Image (cartoon, rainbow, N blue to C red):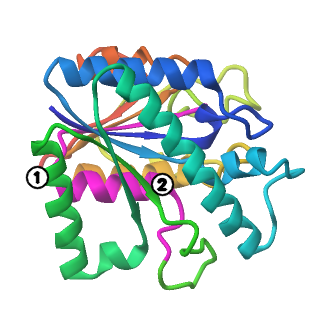
Amino acid sequence: MRIVIKIGTSTLAHATGRLNIQRMERLCKVLSDLKNAGHEIILVSSGAIGMGVGKLNLPGRPADMPGKQAAAAVGQCELMYFYDKLFTEYNHIVAQLLLTGEDIRSEQRSRNVRNTLSRLLELGALPVINENDAVATDEIGVENTIGENDSLSAIVAAAIGADLLILLSDIDGLYDSDPRQNPDAHLIETVPVIDAHILSLAGDKGSALATGGMVTKLHAAQIATAAGCEMVIANGEKPEVLYDIVDGKRAGTRFLIPHS
C-alpha cells in the first residue's frame, strides 16, 4: 500500500518541547519495517516549532510570528537530523519537503510536488514533509498558509493517490463525547459517513505545543475519503499500533470511503 502517516508534536516531543527519543526510535523502526514489507511510506511530521522551543531553551511556544518562525527554523534542523540518523540505521534514505499553501494551490507547483514525491517513492526514499513554518504563517487570512499538518497530510494523500492516511495523535480516536471530561465516553471505531453528527463531536485543540485538534482531523478525513483514501486516527504513544492499522485490524477510529 501507499501510506501517508502524520505524527503530531505531542507524540514526538515531551511537554518540555524536547524530543521523546524512545518513541521516535520506535516509530522509525516500525516505519522501516513497513517499508521492508513493501509498503510505500510518506511521513508528514510536525514538531519543528516545539523542538525549536526546546533547543533554544525558550520558556514556551513564542506568541509572536517571527519567534515561531525562528523556532521552526532551528527545530526543523533538529527534526531532520534525528530522522536521517534513525532511518539510516535501518538502511532507509529520507528526503525533506517543506511546503506552503501556495505549493498546494498553484497548479504547476502542486504538479511539481506530486512529481517529486512520485520519483522519491520510485527511488525507494522515505519523504518527510512539514509545512514551511519558517516562511509560512498560521494566522487566519494569510495567503501562503496551510495552518496545520492534519490538513496537509490529507492534501498530500489525495494528491499522491494514497491508499491509507494515518493520523497519530495523543488521543485514541474519535469519541462520542470528550474523554478528558467524561469517563464514560465511548470510542467510535468506524465512521462510514462524516455527517453533521460526526462533525459536532469535535472538541477544542489538544496540547499546548500543538496546533491541531479533532476539528482539523475531521476536515482531513473529509479530504482523504473524498479522494478515495481511508483514514485512521490513532494514539501514537505506541507506534507498534501501525502494524494493526495496516493489517486492517481494529485500532483507533477508521473513516471509510463513502459509497457513491
Amino acid type at mark 2: Asn
Span colored in magenta: 145-170
Residue name at image x 56 percent, y 52 percent: 76
Q: Position of residue 42 (x, y in %)?
A: 29, 42
Q: Which dot marks residue 221?
A: none
**Residue 196 sits in which quadrant?**
bottom left
Side of 203 where 63 appears, left or right: right
Q: Can you say whether 180 is above or below 260 in the image? A: above
Front label number (1 vs 2): 2
Question: As shown in the figure, which amino acid type bears the numbered disc 1?
Answer: Ser
Residue 45: percent from the left, percent from the top?
47, 45
Q: Position of residue 117 (x, y in %)?
A: 20, 54
Q: Residue at label 1? A: 260
Q: Secondary structure at mark 2?
A: helix
Q: Is residue 154 visible?
A: yes
Magenta stretch: residue 153 in it?
yes
Q: On the image, numbered disc 2 is attached to which residue?
A: 149
Q: In screen coordinates, is 157 left or right of 22?
A: left
**Local crowd at mark 1 within 10 Å, few (<14), some, or many (≥20)?**
few
Image quarter of the N terminus: top left
Q: Quadrant of residue 41?
A: top left
Position of residue 47 measured from the top left corner of the image (x, y, whole percent): 59, 46
